Image (spheres, coloured by chain):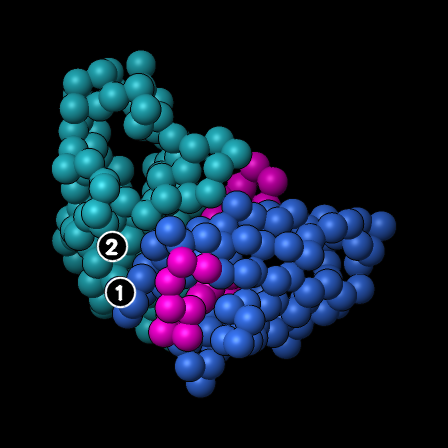
Amino acid sequence: QVQLVESGGGVVQPGTSLRLSCAASGFTFSSSGMHWVRQAPGRGLEWVANILNDGSEVSYVDSVKGRFTISRDDSKNTVYLQMNSLRTEDTAVYYCAKDRGFTWSFDYWGQGTLVTVSS
Amino acid sequence: HSALTQPASVSGSPGQSITISCTGTSSDVGRYNYVSWYQQHPGKAPKLMIYEVSNRPSGVSNRISGSKSGNTASLTISGLQAEDEADYYCASFTSDSSWVFGGGTKLTVL
């Protein structure tokens, strides 16, 4: 069965960095686009970043462009989100999600990892 | 892209039908048939309920259906059950190759 397991969350100060990981299993990772989606406490979902199955293209929500970088390591079946210059408004649960094969939807989600940016 | 517009809450009694709307623009909902819907129970990860406007993934109840007209997509749940009580989010692919979610709708089963 498909499993996505996020890790790397924690409490950090504004201006610092954090790297999230999402370990995937149960499907052909190298054939799947992957996303990061976040949810601030008590708020709705916000799409953050996407990487295509071959890593040839990435995209980001405007609020994280220039600060966050999505990448993947197909040898480890893992997708990453490098977050630099963190702001208090980046506080959220971060989910990784699998793209449903060119339907531009998210068919499997991890359990999420909480990132808290606070001084 | 601004968030898609959903009603903050809807409610219905068991057995009834409800519809949740999701309004975007000609750059997202109106431009592509890449609208999807997600159910989220408290403290849980979202679950895909509808993709490409009206397609149900395997395992999703046929009481769930989706449609679109112009810049507005809709999710309909018929034969409401207590287990349907959750938050629902729409999402759409956009013209700048990004994705945008709706603000979410809290469904209460009375």
Q: Amino acid at mark 2?
A: Tyr
Circle 1: element type: loop
* Chain shown in blue: A
For image coordinates 32% across by 24% down, the residue present is: B83
- The residue identified by callout 1 is A103
For image coordinates 23% across by 40% down, the residue present is: B60
Would you place residue B88 above or below residue A96 in this image? above
Quadrant (top left/top right/bottom left/bottom right) for the C terminus of chain B: top left
What span is in magenta? A25-49
* Chain shown in cyan: B
Q: Nearer the viewer, residue B7 or B101?
A: B101
For image coordinates 58% across by 54% down, the residue present is: A6
Q: Is residue A79 visible?
A: no
Residue B79 lies, in percent from the top left, at 16, 24
Would you place residue A70 above or below residue B67 in this image? below
Quadrant (top left/top right/bottom left/bottom right) for the N terminus of chain B: bottom left
Furthest-bottom residue in this view: A56
Q: Chain of mark 2?
A: B
Residue B76 lies, in percent from the top left, at 19, 37
Q: Is residue A19 magenta?
A: no
For image coordinates 63% across by 76% down, the residue present is: A66
- The residue identified by callout 2 is B51
Q: Amino acid at mark 1?
A: Thr
**For this view, does A8 lie left or right of residue B31?**
right
Q: Chain of mark 1?
A: A
Pointer 1 with pointer 2, Cβ within 8 A: yes
Circle 2: element type: loop
Label for residue B27?
none
Q: Nearer the viewer, residue B59 or A56?
A: B59
Residue A29 lies, in percent from the top left, at 42, 69
